Every structure is written in C-alpha cells, then in structure tokens.
Amino acid sequence: MTFFAPFCIPFIIGTVSLFVTIIAKWVSWVYYMPRTDRKLLRRGLFSMQTVKGVGEVVCECLLHRRIFRINPLLGYMHMSLAFGWFLLIVVGWLETVAYLGLEPVPLQGHVFFRYFATGISEHKPVFDFVMDALLLFVLSGVALAWGKRFYSRAMGMRRTTKHFLGDRVALSALWFIFPARLVAESLTCALYGGGGFLTGTIGRWMASHVNIEILQMLYEPSWWFYSCALGVFFVAMPFSRYQHIFTEIPLIFLRRYRLLPHEKASSLDKFQIQACSRCGICLDPCQLQQDLGINDVQSVYFLRDRRYNRLKLAVANNCLMCGRCEAVCPVGINLNTLRQNSRDRLRNIPDESRYKYFKGLDRSSGEGRVGYFAGCMTLLTPRTLHSMEQIFKAVGEDVWWADRDGGVCCGRPLKLSGETDSAKKMMQFNKELFYKHNISILVTSCPICLRVFREEYALRGIEVLHHSEYIARLMREGRLKLNNDGGRVTYHDPCELGRGCGIYDAPREVLSAVGELLEPKHTRENSYCCGGSLANTVIGDAQQLRLAQTMSAEFEATGAGTVVTSCPLCKKSIARGTSMPVKDLSEIVAENIAS
Amino acid sequence: MAAINWGFAISRPRVIDVDHNNLRKSDEILLEMPELQSCIGCGACTASCTAGNLTQFNFRKVHTLVRRGEYQGAYEEMNKCMLCGKCRLLCPRGINTRGVVMLIKRKLGDF
C-alpha cells in the first residue's frame, strides 16, 4: 500500500514548516537565555520536577483544568479541542497499528488513514465508533467556539479578544479542519462503505440521496480541502496565537525549574509571552476595561504587542498592576513581571550620578530592636503614624523610627515605572540604613514598601512584617488587649498586600477582635484595586476617582459603618470615592486599646 | 585697563525672556499633558516632596521654568525625584504629577 496522494502535499509542507519553526524558536530562546538560567535548566532537567511537570502538562495543556475552575463551559471548549484532537491523533495511530501491524507508515498515512484504507476489506467497528465519537467531541468544541465569537456572554465572558489578521487566518483554518474532516470521511463512507455512527450514517444518507457522480466529483476535492486546512493552520501556527500549544509545554517545565522572568527582559520571557493563547480571560477582571472603557492595554494586548515588537510606552505604562489578571490567567504567565521588565526596557537609563544626595543621610531617631518604616504614603496619612506610635507605646516597645523625619523612598514606585537601576540605589541606601541600626524586626504600614522589602531587599537577619501582622502577633502574645467597640466594619484588601504578599488573614484576625467584619462582594483574591496604584502613570484624576467610586459602592452595600484598609494609599483613594469614614487598620486598633 | 576688583559684582540678569526662549519642547509637553494648564502653582507638590525634604529639589520651580522654556538643568533636577507619588495625592487640580516628571524627563533627556 502506498501512502501518498497529491492532496497530501499541503499537509506535508505545513507539518515540516511547523516543526522547523518551533524547534528553531526553542533552540534560539534557550541559547540566548542568561547563563544562570541555563544552569538552572540543566540542574532541573534530571530532577523530580520533570516527572511532576509531565503530570501538569496533561492536566493543563490537554485537560485545561485551570480554565475549568474559572468557567466550566469555557474549559469544556478548550478541552474538547485540545484533548479531543490529541486523542484523535493517538487513537488514529492505534487504528493504523491494528490494521497494519507495526509496519512503518509515514505521517500522512496516519492522518489520512480513511482515504488510504479504502482498499482494506477487513473492518474494525470499535475503531470506527471511537474515532467518530472523538470527532463529535472535537466538533462540539468547534461549535462552542463559533458561538463564543458571535455571542461571548453565552460562554460567561463579557468580552472576547479582538484578533488581528494573522490570528484570524489561523483561527478560520482551525475551525475548518474538523468540519472538513467530517465531510471528507463521510464522502469516503458514502462511496466505499464502513464508518461509525457519525461518518457512516452521514455516508449512507449521502449514498441514498445524492447522485453517485456528484459524490465522486466531490471526493478528491474534499480531501484536498481537509489537507489544505491542516497545512494553512500548521504554517500559520507558530506566527499566531496558536504558538501557545507548543510553548506552554516547555513553560510548565521551566516554571518548575524556577526559571521565571526577571526584572530585566531576556529571551526567557519569550517562553511566557508566546505561551499566551489570547483566550481573553484577562479582559473581564481588568478594571480599566470595566470602569473606564480602555480596551487596548490589557495583558492579552500587551503580550501581543510585545511579541510582535509593537509595544508602545503608553500601553506598557497604562496598567494598575493590581494583579487581578495574573490571578486568573489559565497559563499562569507572570504578567506583572513582564509588564515591569518591558517598562525597564523602554525607559531605564542608568545614571551613576543620580541620587548623590543620599550620601551620609540618616534622619532616623530612637533606639530599639524593632524598626518602623513609615514609607512616603504613611507620612502623608499622619493618623496612621500616630496610631502606630500609640500601639508601640501601649505594648512598651522601644522603636527605631527609620523615616519619621523624612527618609528615602523604598524604591518600588521607581522600579514599577521602569527605572530599575536607579531604584537599586534607593534599595541599597535603605538596606544599609537598616543594618546600621541593628534591628531584628522591621515593621512597615505600607504594603508597597513591604513587598519590595520582602522581594528585593534580601534582608538577612531582619524579619519584615506588615503592621497588620505585627498587631496580630501582639494580640496572640497577649501583649495587646483590644475592646470590641469598633462596630460593623468592612475591609479592603490592598493589591500589594493581598495578591502581592498573600496576606489576607492577619488583618481579618485583628478586625474581628475590634468589631464585626462584613466582607464586600469582591474580596480577598478578587478584591478591586482602589485606582490610586502607583504602577499606572497614564490615567488621570477623574479616571482614578471613578475606579474608587465603583469600589466604594460595594463597601456601602455591605451596610458597615466604617471602611478599613491597611494601605495608606488605598485609604486616600477610597476616601475620595465614598462618604463613609475610611480608617487604617492601625487607627481602629489604637482607638480600641483596652486600658 | 585691568578691571578693578571692588568686591562686588553685577548679578546675572534672571529675567525669563519668553520671546527668545524656544518653547517647542514646552508646547510638546503641554500637548501631551494638557491638564498642566490647570496648575495654579500652589506648591503642594513641593511641600510634600520626599526628595524636597532632603534636597533643594523644587518641583513647582522646575515645572514652571520648563513651561517658560528654561530647560537648562531641568533634566538633572528632575532626576532627584523618587517618583513616590505623594504630590499626586495632594495636587488640588488632580494633575498626574508622576506622569509630568516622566514626561519632562522624556522630552528633555536623551531617550
């Protein structure tokens, strides 16, 4: 049996082009990786992580478990296309083995087996049934995908991604592949018999209702069309969103080997950028989209622009970096890090002479093993600072005040704006200051500072605590007794504290001790950003206010008397959007200290 | 005739001649950030400034000079800013001051 027909040519060209492009991409990305990352890769390759990675690949790339968790219908759509197609390939291979034994068959022989198998008289109905069932499975996914394009709300998505031409070509080819396969196989069944409940039934119907000459005339073109759809899709795949199919697999392993994007852009980022499938799940959580109608800066568009080197500063800068999209990304792309290192690439200019005035600066006061770093924003909300003073006094703690009389910023705002190298100077200054004063605990009431202290400073021997954690600890140790007179309060999770540092429970523990806690609709991992985010340097005042107002409406709906948050910046932003009193966690604690 | 050193000198004139200054950059800045026109020069930004607390950095002054076409040294001066964002919270006109700092640096710097 020969396994070649002229219609196979588009498919063969497509397949060769696909694999050459993919391998060239992977090799060049690994080749241009920073050396330390390559070392991590070599070390990780022969560890348990590789085995665990295989499991994750099955769960994510084939079954799409994370999308299922977000939205079951959407999960089914992705799974039917990915897992269904995968099974079609595997079962198709088994089918050829069952018919022909282990004799070598070229790739097109497996893919177009029905075409070449017409000469075989023996018949295996089990395979006919399974292959038809799988085809139906995939077709149901394609039908859902069509439906989603026309009416995305039916799939639980308010919005779906706007695609550019290349993606549309690949998308159309993908949509045609399975209907074309159905038609080609049904025609084959109509002319030669066989087939399962789907193709066989359609084939028999065609044979009895359609003139045989017409069927014969359509037979070859239908296989040509199927092959062309496959060929076009395979050629377009590495240059379109469908590159994610093959990029997500190495990404899962790299992530397990702890190869994550850095603050400086590198070729490692390409594994993340090209793993984006542009599913558009990041669109709905984006508050810029929801409240302000800005619809070209979301992560999916940012990654697309960066991938095709069309990224503009205005797009890179227009993001709150609240992390709501990162929390739902089914591929688990480190969207905030990528956004930050894009900004670094676009506008970082190292300047040696910058911040010379830091030299010899030390305005700290007090003595103690506990250090308190107020941070710029806390200095602007003096009530928080005074409340912290009261709390420290109540527990009789000696405190070293790092910046009560002015100090250097923690460096995170500058880093978020892209000037990474200059931000390093601030970090270095503060780090030396902390070491000089020999503290063992560093308390800060600003989550922005907290995050950078934990992630960048690498403070050895100093425990960094947010004031909510510190107060919770004082309560647990019995050093701080509180009255439960705070009334009904609601709590806002600051982005940097919640999604950024994973601190959700400490402030709630404190709040339940001083009052009755009522949760707003969007809370914990889903909480809104207050709009004041330092990461966004594009949106204006009115737009920030609108974000704050949307969020405040949820607080008012809880029926609480007071809004409590634990970030000075959030406090300022929320206060503009609501008429309710807004307090910092430390304020409500200081008011309720039992004497 | 050698000049006699009297121990005094005439101060350099500090007049800003807007007719002679090249306002092209200033106009570009205004075009990109039109809200700057609503600045009332109250100085809240300067009063709250973290860098201004430690140095002579004066955001209102630099911004005003740039608007009048006096670009000399503005970039270096703006580099003292730590971009902490306190000024933005205090601005009574709600000007995106951090955006202004970045914009002035972009227009007057080399990038």
Image: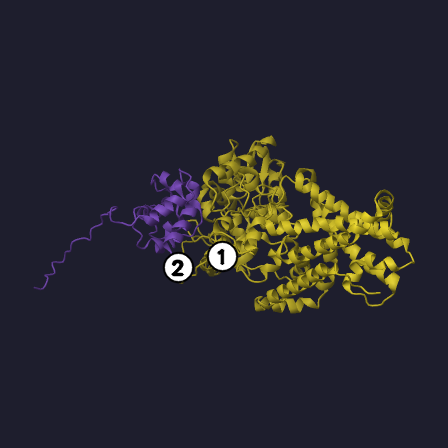
Chain colours: A yellow, B purple
Query: Who's the residue at 62% across and 41% down the image?
Result: A159
Q: Are marks 2 and 1 on the same chain?
A: yes
Q: Are marks 2 and 1 in contact (CB under 8 Å)?
A: no
- Please, what is the three-letter code of the amino acid marked with disc 2? Arg
Residue A440 point in image, percent of width and height: 53, 57
Please identify the quadrant where the N terminus of chain A is shown: bottom right
The answer to whether residue A214 shows anywhere in this view is yes
Quadrant showing the C terminus of chain A: top right
Query: Does residue B35 appear left or right of residue A544 in this picture?
Result: left
Residue A372 tag number: none
Residue to which mark 2 is pinned: A354
Q: Front-most of B51 and A466? A: B51
Q: Which chain letter goes with mark 2?
A: A
The circle on residue A344 is 1
Query: How far across and down, in percent of the image, does residue A158 sit?
Result: 63, 39
User: Tag count in the figure?
Assistant: 2
Decide: few, some or many residues near mark 1? Use Cα within 10 Å; few <14, some 14-19, many ≥20: many
Chain letter, disc 1 residue: A
- Outermost residue on the front side: it is A213
Q: Nearer the viewer, residue A429 or B78?
A: B78
Disc nearest the viewer among 2 and 1: 1
Earlier along the polypeptide chain: callout 2 or callout 1? 1
x then y, percent, for residue A152: 66, 40
Regarding mark 1 in the picture, which secondary structure is present there? helix
Per the model, the C-alpha gap separating discs 2 and 1 is: 17 Å
Residue A405's place in the image compared with A159, above or below, is: below
Closest to the observer, A548 or A335:
A335
**Residue occupying the far left of the picture:** B1
Tag 1: amino acid? Asp
Secondary element type, mark 2: loop
Can you give x and y, in whole percent of width and height, for residue A99 in the image? 88, 61
Q: Classify mark 2: residues with Cα within 10 Å, few (<14), some (14-19) or many (20+).
A: some
